[in-house]
Amino acid sequence: MMRDTVILRVVVKLLLPAILIFALYVQFHGDYGPGGGFQAGVAAAAAIILYGMVFGIDEAKKVVPRRIVNTMIPLGVLIFAGTGVASLLLGENYLDYSPLGSKPVKGQHLGILIVEAGVFITVASTMLAIFYVFGGRADEADEKGGEG
Amino acid sequence: MLAQHLPALQVVIPLLAAPLCALFRRGFIGWLIAVAATWLAFAAAIGLLFRVLNEGVISYAMGGWAPPIGIEYRVDLINVFVLVVVSGVGSVIIPFARTGTAARFNDTDQAWFYAMYLLALTGLLGVTITGDAFNIFVFLEISSLASYVMIAMGRDRRALTAAYQYLIMGTVGATFIVIGIGLLWAMTGTLNLADLAQRIPEINDTRPVLAALAFLTVGISLKLALFPLHLWLPNAYAYAPAVTSAFLAGTATKVAIYLFLRFFYTVFGGGGFFESTPLPEMFLVLSVVAMFAASTVAVFQDDVKRMFAYSSVAQIGLITLGISYVSETGLTGAMTHLFNHAIIKAGIFMLLGGVMFRMASVKLEDMAGIGRKMPFTMAGIVILGLALIGTPGTSGFISKWWIVLAALEKDQWWLVALILLASLITMLYVGRIVEVAYFREPSAKAADVREAPLAMLIPAYVLVIATIYFGLDTQWSVGLAQRAAADLLAGIY
Amino acid sequence: MTEILADLNYWVTIFLMIGGLYIITAHGNMIKKLVGLGIFQTSVYLLFLSPGKVLGGTAPIIAPGFELYSNPLPHVLILTAIVVGVATIALGLALVVRIHEAYGTIEDDEVQEMEAD
């Protein structure tokens, strides 16, 4: 880890909020232009990964702990699939968001927003989980006495 | 209301259950969720079967977007038959899974294992039910990725290399399939299978469509482990945990066979397709070679799981042999064998899982004299082995009978002789196990072995009894397969 | 010459496809094989995206003043395929890490040698 490079640390700290805001912009602008949960999730995860690469993976884990990441992966999928079930319960076909709002258009809008939120959560946490697992493998192996 | 949404529920139930398992991260809760989800999925498949029998083809528009623009779930007799097989085998294995997984993995790993199992099931059911070509690829990859993980969780380190090898081969296969789909889409502008079936016959002599056919043939053959593209299968089955072996042997290759039928009969079938391409002859030759080569290799295996993995390749050859006739009798035989072989092989791998659980080995030498130590397990293996050979009174006989009938229909006596010869080789390797297990002194490892736990024996015996039952009452297996075969042939002109 | 250049994207597709497959089959190093797999899959992305482009068309977002749009379908499909590809590569690399821990090597032939005995 690059703990001695002051410039890098300062720049990264300045960049982090910008990256996160950009992720949110991509997320919520997905209704009107290119964007959406996938891209936003990767951008948000990239911010944390950048932080982890500069300040060390343990620091990153303090920001977003493994437990939260492991919970968020299935949670996002549940939100996604659950939206479909909600439309099922409201009498329409699976993933037909029209009945979620007062008007079909509003329902579609709300539906895709929730689904994209689910995608965002899963994608961001999956990217982080991959980073943690690969990055932390050596440390874990040391703790277990060289056994994987 | 519920019946109307059965096509979606079929896939959504295991899909929702998988993240729930991962969320709770408790082995027992995960197992309970998996039991509930698999049995509900099985119930959904049965419900769909009755709906199709009563109403004919069901079309379900995902998200309310009408086909062919939206993704359509299309259920007809052909895929509902496969749905019942896959979800049925999937639901019998899960009760069996508890004992073995609880003994080997910690709580979190168990939960993830069940999540992967459910995802693999989701993928396979999705491939079967969807009427959209690209959706097939996505579900195929979901099931494949989950099964790579499940294979890698085997206790031997060779499970890792087996999973890696399967990952490379499987991904190449799936990518070939998606290249084929892409070429078809570029030529027709549609991804809906029913829509493709209408448009392909007109242009089936253009070069991109022929290239698509080639890519699809190789890709699907890789997935169904048709000789000589079967190399990933033996190691994957041999070193995976028993649950994985049983599940994959019973479902994954069967779904690939369904894909094969769907693409060649429904999508490409029209416009004199089977007369203008050498595919039937090609598959006939490859199937016969598979039956002999794989069976012969199986005879010389020392690891019993590996032996039955090679036997799977041979049995897949038998199924594709039935398909290659392009006749109703042959297809009936192939689909019946798809049904029967799923039950037989899943049962065998579950019983071997019991042996593995008690002895930590399924080497032939270690299994010496085990017939007296584990009488029920071995009796089950022998009954299922007899079904593999095709002994009258077991389900294996029925399907072989139909495939032989199909050969007779075409006056190909030499083929009948070859099928019987291949059965004799099957008898050799089943006989080897019987000889070692019953007529030898117990090995050092087998000396103080007890019968497998009931929780493992009972689910396996459900399949053993099913094998005998479907050997006597063929109303459901052959009856449905025959109607599905007629439907498949209706797509050819 | 112009004919060849007009189909440049397809030539690149074929090049990547064959190159990727060659790497998968020719290299014994497990990570290189995965790299080959990645290249092979990339060719598919290009194969799908190429016919989706409509000459003169703009991004498929309905806006006043535009009438010709590119086909948005391949982008959606390939977004999915990319996710599948990422998952495959990640899983493959994870397996390679585990293989390295179990065997101490990631060369195909060396691993096979160790498995033989």
Image: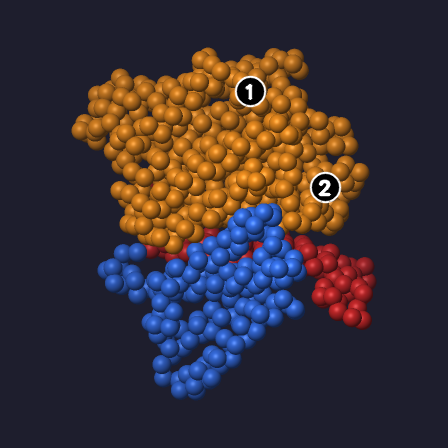
Chain colours: A blue, B orange, C red
x and y, in percent, of residue A107 in the image? 61, 59
Image quadrant containing the N terminus of chain C: bottom right
Dot 2 lies on which element?
Answer: helix
Can the viewer see residue B369 in this picture? no
Left or right of residue C63: residue B253: left
Q: Classify B176 as above or below B320.
A: below
Q: Mark 1 lies on which chain?
A: B
Q: Which of marks 2 and 1 is nearer the N terminus?
A: 2
Front position in the image: B338 or C89: B338
Indicate the amino acid at tag 1: Val
x and y, in percent, of residue B200 in the image? 75, 39
Name of the residue lying farthest toward the left: B448
Indicate the amino acid at tag 2: Leu
Determine crowd level at label 1: few under 14, some 14-19, many 20+ residues with C-alpha closer than 10 A: many
Q: Quadrant of residue B128?
A: top right
Front position in the image: B123 or C104: B123
Front position in the image: B468 or A86: A86
Q: Which chain carries label 2?
A: B
Instruction: Tell me how many marks there are.
Output: 2
What residue lies at 29% left-to-right and 61% top-to-bottom?
A141
Front position in the image: A47 or B268: A47
What residue lies at 21% left-to-right and 28% top-to-bottom?
B450
Circle 1 residue: B478
What residue lies at 23% left-to-right and 60% top-to-bottom?
A145
Determine crowd level at label 2: few under 14, some 14-19, many 20+ residues with C-alpha closer than 10 A: many
Image quadrant containing the C terminus of chain C: top left
x and y, in percent, of residue C3 in the image? 81, 59
Circle 2 residue: B196
